[in-house]
Amino acid sequence: AQSVTQPDIHITVSEGASLELRCNYSYGATPYLFWYVQSPGQGLQLLLKYFSGDTLVQGIKGFEAEFKRSQSSFNLRKPSVHWSDAAEYFCAVGFSGGYNKLIFGAGTRLAVHP
Amino acid sequence: KAGVTQTPRYLIKTRGQQVTLSCSPISGHRSVSWYQQTPGQGLQFLFEYFSETQRNKGNFPGRFSGRQFSNSRSEMNVSTLELGDSALYLCASSIDRNEAFFGQGTRLTVV
């Protein structure tokens, strides 16, 4: 069965420090991969996506992610975190079966210390 | 370009009642998906509609239903509400390849 694992439930970093959020997926074919961010009480905002091609993808707000097929991973990175990045981050996998359905990880809550 | 609009933003209902939530997708998007978000279960797929047809359904009881109109607007209905149905219900619209754009959600509280 398809699944997404985000091993870290909570992460705390200092403002200005680098960030890496981990995501591993289980899916038989080449997946569509996404990272979303959610502020409290709000909907989900798409940060970046991977469909095919270059395995390093750039997103909004200075985020990037790298698809590694051999490790079934799609980790999210940011070189320097800002206090406004504090939120919950979700990794998701989509399917190539002709319909729109996302399987989400449990999320990683990011806290940023000044 | 207007985003995905969900109404109402907040609802309080009593056990046993039914509720209808509404979602207006981004103009031109024909696919609308619904998700339930709870602290315990996280984000779970409810169902997806495309051109007024349900294409896929998640693992939820029959009390959860939906429909899509010719203008792509969608509604979801929950009958005989239970306390466990309290959640943030998120609607997403898509053009293709699963790139979903989410609304702000409807916060449903069942008392």
Image (cartoon, grey):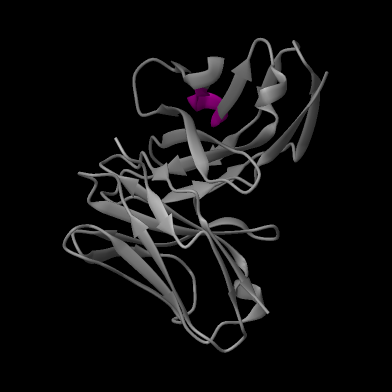
Q: Which residues are magenta?
A: A67-73
Q: Is residue B7 left or right of residue B25?
A: right
Image location of residue B78, percent across then percent down: 47, 77
Nearest to the observer: residue A50 or residue A88: A88
Residue B66 position by quadrant = bottom left
- Residue A18 seen in this snapshot: yes
Q: Is residue B10 left or right of residue B33?
A: right
Is A79 situated above or below A107? Answer: above
The residue at the point 74 percent across, 36 percent down is A8
- Residue A65 seen in this snapshot: no
User: Where does the C terminus of chain B fall, quadrant-wise?
Assistant: bottom right
The residue at the point 39 percent across, 70 percent down is B76
Image location of residue A108, percent across then percent down: 69, 38
Image location of residue B59, percent across then percent down: 48, 69
Q: Is residue B72 magenta?
A: no
User: Where does the N terminus of chain B fall, quadrant-wise?
Assistant: top left
The residue at the point 49 percent across, 72 percent down is B60
